[in-house]
Image (tube, coloured by chain):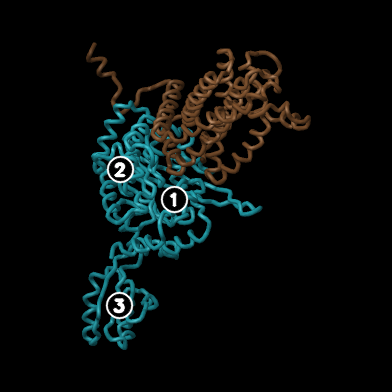
Amino acid sequence: MTALTTASAPSPTAPPERGPVASFLRESFIVFRRQLRMNLRNPAWVIIGALQPVLYLLLFGPLLEPLVAEFGFANAYTFFVPGMLVQLGLFGAFFAGFGLIAEWREGVVEAERVTPANRTALLVGRLMRDELQLLVQAMILVALGYALGMRAPAHGVVLGVALTMLIGGACAAASNALALTTKSEDVMAPMINMIMMPVLLLSGILLPMTLGAKWLQTVADVMPTKHVVDAVRTSFAGEFVGSMMFWGVGWTVLLFVLAVWWGTATFRRENS
Amino acid sequence: MTAMIRARGLVQTFTTRHGRTTKEVRAVDGVDLDVAEGEVVGFLGPNGAGKTTTLRMLTTLLRPTAGEATVAGYDVVREARDVRRSIGYVSQAGGAFSAARAGDEVVDHGMLYGMSRREATERGQRLFEQLDLPGLWTRMPRTMSGGQKRRLDIAMGLIHEPRLVFLDEPTTGLDPQARANLWEHITDLRARRGATVFLTTHYLDEADALSDRIVIIDAGRIVAADTAANLKAQVAGDLVDLEIADPERVPQAAERLEALLATNGTGPSAVEVDGRHVRGRVPRAGGKVPGLLRDLDRLGIDLASIEVHRPTLDDVFLALTGRSLRDAEAAAEAGPDEDAPDNPGSAPAAPSPTPPTNSATTSAGADR
């Protein structure tokens, strides 16, 4: 019996056969772990990324305190933390692609693509890192919000953070796709700035759009991220039904699906 | 012997845009290749000839526009994953991230080939020993010398013990000592592992020193494929270079060399006079030069020096394409780089692979 098992054992050079799903998860995890290790070795960007919303919360939040009553909100931080969450999801993740350009230039992407690893796993592993980073930053933000006096039900926070993760994942996927398409920081940075300015101004992240004139509100209604901010905000307020939630969740899921599809297509494309 | 690489009619066209007009460029234009198991083949050509593009098609990074290829017995399009499992590829750009730890990069790379962490670590550390990288396991590639970095890239390419290894411009940008050292390691690939090696280079001496057989590509087409010795034999003989002591005797010396060439049926026009130098190509010069020297001595023509050059691959390239490799290189550098628009090595921010002066000295310095 023992002899039989030794004989049938695979030779050490032949990799053990795994199912397609198992290999996909394994390969994604290898890529994820590698990315995470590099982030932890050089955490400056993670810290700067997390510090930014914290500073907003500490320095801009107090300015809102006397004003929130006018927006129809009782608590400045219940209003403000969701906006900061979405901002974190959008901005932090959109810079993920810059790291990929650096890797591409050093031949890392090509070296990975010449292995039998699934090419979608190469993207998914990177997205997992971006999502983990976002989750940690979101937790810091929420904890700090509670410390400053935010009032929000736990399940509302969970849903809000989940929406943030989805929109962040969408941005990270789009950023990676953009990085592999442009392959140049000099092209990518202005493009991101061009997208980010109107997103920041028209999504009601800092102040609610309802303060603005009718035309401004109409313009903001076209902005998908405005609906995402609204949804996270209502979720933090403890409301889970209504048209705000419907549009917000709808847009978030749609953007996520589109961006991941784009990212996957870019990573699978033969010549990139 | 079984075929490791078999390509028929490989074509790759790129569309380049200059302003509003789009132009179709055939970077690789009908390439046929045969490489047997255990062979070391040098793929030689000037920059922009289509070397890297061909390599990227053979390594499944680029889908051929037309034609077909089997690599390690698998079709590059239909069985791409099997091809990837069987080959190692060391690109010009390398593959280890400069700010990661060398050992981590090698282990992760091995794991993407399906190896366990332990297995990849063991093999990686063995490769580090074999490739003279002791103590560099936890170092960042950023802090390594050019030669160490290249050997690390090769270690990554060998982690899964491939039967076939592709090396793209392995010694470009290295100093002469590091080149010589890397050559030994490349020779070892076959000697120690029995691997088939397919390497691209635009250094003639490199192709000459490393490969059993040389395939020359120019403007996307294969212009020759043979052993270095056979290719050189195609060039009409060795170059005899006489330096005459007395400038006034130069025409007379030229006459003698012409006479020698005439007995071989080579026209007198083959003799070139350049200042005090008289040059001509003499087949099997070793047996004829003594007679020529006696002849000149009898006439009282003193020589300042005599040199006999074996033909170089540069001569072969010239004979095959009508231009020297260096000219072809200069033309490619002047024009847009059409070799590999999407190749990391050609990224605008990346340093230029070789200064032209460097390649000129090395190609001239070989063999002489």
- In three-dimensional space, the C-alpha distance between marks 3 and 1, rounded to whole angstroms, equals 41 Å
Question: Does B182 sit left or right of A200 as displayed?
Answer: left
- Relative to B337, say whether B360 is above or below: below
Percent coordinates x, y for residue B254 in the rendering: 33, 82
Circles 3 and 1: CB distance less than 8 Å? no
Quadrant of the snapshot with the C terminus of chain B: bottom left
Residue under circle 1? B51
Q: Secondary structure at mark 1?
A: helix
Residue under circle 2? B38
Q: Secondary structure at mark 3?
A: helix
Q: Residue at x 73, y 28 (%)?
A: A211
Q: Are marks 3 and 2 on the same chain?
A: yes
Percent coordinates x, y for residue B14 in the rendering: 55, 48
Q: Where residue B260 is drawn, which disc sits there?
A: 3
Q: Nearer the viewer, mark 1 or mark 2?
A: 1
Circles 1 and 2: CB distance less than 8 Å? no
Instruction: Look at the image and give the colour of chain A.
Output: brown
Chain identifier matching the cyan colour in the rendered picture: B
